[in-house]
Amino acid sequence: MSPLFKEIRGSPILWLLAAVPVVFLAAALFPEAHTALFVLSVLAIVPLAGLLSHATESVAAKTGDAAGGLLNATLGNLTELVIALAALQAGQYTLVKASIAGAIVTNTLFMLGASFLLGGLKYHIQEFNRASARLQAGLLFLATVALLMPSVLGGLDTASVAPVTQTLSLSLAVLLIIGYGLGLLFTLGTHREFFSSADHAEAGEAPWPIGLALGTLAGVTVLVALVSEIFVESVQEAAVAFGMTPAFVGFIVVALVGAAAEMASAFSGARKNRLDLSVGIALGSASQIALFVAPVLVLMSYVIGPSPMDLQFWPGAVMMMFLATVTAMFVTNSGRSAWFVGVLVLMVYIIFATTLYVLPPAVR
């Protein structure tokens, strides 16, 4: 365990791990102190994200950036999945859909754009595997097309649309899971040679032993999920105190905090010229949410939900997901990046965030 303790001693930001037991204690003693719980949960998630970042880099050093990015995206999305399942069981389908759409947009635009910017500020030009990025963007495009169809039907104001939308959503959920599985088979199996990382990474510290890295990944992921639940329970009340609209909270705040662990790994990879890892985490996480997490939630709603959930999103959410996907396809087409590319992507995200911030609370 010495590498883990050495990392904690040598990084002042990891000293914030002290906030983890504090937030659990505060949640038990003062469950109505929503603003304080909101701040404490954010302070607790930040150092946990740092630990998850280091552990992921150690795993990626053994498995390659493609598999490392997939592993980080999967573990990072467990947080969103746990939170969404809790909301699903409570019948809060609006919150579930907002978290799905917000996570897709945030990972595709903010995480990818910030990675390009942070890496570009240190390196004049960075390169990444164009084939891998284009495949992830293509999978994301497939998912947005599938999510668009129930929303189009939902706009028809007829009594017979609801059962049709539900049947279509169930069929699309199964289809998207199959597509995601075939994508994994293609990238990690039959054509894995096309998705190897561009070898431009700088030398860094020795990676942790694989056992320690995997154990840290598992333990920290559980803690992030538990702290995130406290965060979600407190964020709505805290948002009122800070003057944020429900739409802004669901799409921006919850998505940013929920993806903090993945972002730490993506940003660290970009600064170390391992842009394949960053792109793999950002687009891999977004496509996994759209192709796997969202369909699983539809299927699970038949088991744990008060009623079946469909894939019908409000038009603004569908438009933002579609434009985020098109933006990702555009900026990853060349396999090269510079700091200004990141600025352009972040500007698109800021436009969305500004729109949601000024949106009246009654509009969704």
Image (cartoon, rainbow, N blue to C red):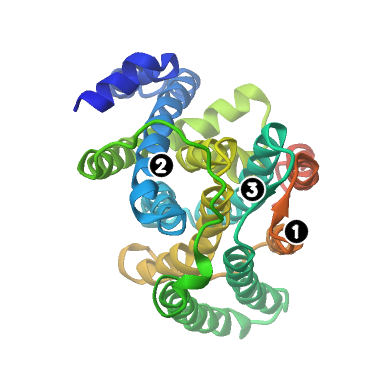
- The residue lying toward the viewer, choosing from 210 and 259, is 210
**Callout 1 amino acid:** Thr
- The residue lying toward the viewer, choosing from 187 and 224, is 187
Residue 112: image tag: 3
Q: Is residue 348 left or right of residue 194?
A: right
Quick check: 139 above or below 119? Answer: below
Pinpoint residue 80: horizontal percent, then vertical percent: 44, 49
Q: Of the residues under marks 1 and 3, which one precedes in the sequence?
A: 3
Q: Of the residues under marks 2 and 1, which one precedes in the sequence?
A: 2
**Could you tell me if the residues under marks 1 and 3 are in contact, i.e. CB atoms within 8 Å?**
no
Q: Is residue 9 left or right of residue 317?
A: left
**Callout 3 amino acid:** Leu
**What residue sits 79% from the left and 38% below the top?**
358
- The residue lying toward the viewer, choosing from 339 and 175, is 339
The mark lying in front, picked from 2 and 3, is: 2
CA distance separating discs 2 and 3: 17 Å
Query: Dot 2 corresponds to which residue?
Result: 57
CA distance separating discs 1 and 3: 10 Å
Quadrant occupied by the N terminus: top left
Q: Is residue 233 left or right of residue 195?
A: left
Quick check: 337 above or below 184? Answer: above
Query: Dot 1 corresponds to which residue?
Result: 327
Rate crowding at label 2 as few (under 14), some (14 to 19) or many (20 or more) other CA atoms within 10 Å.
Answer: many
Q: Is residue 246 visible?
A: no
Q: Quadrant of residue 133?
A: bottom right
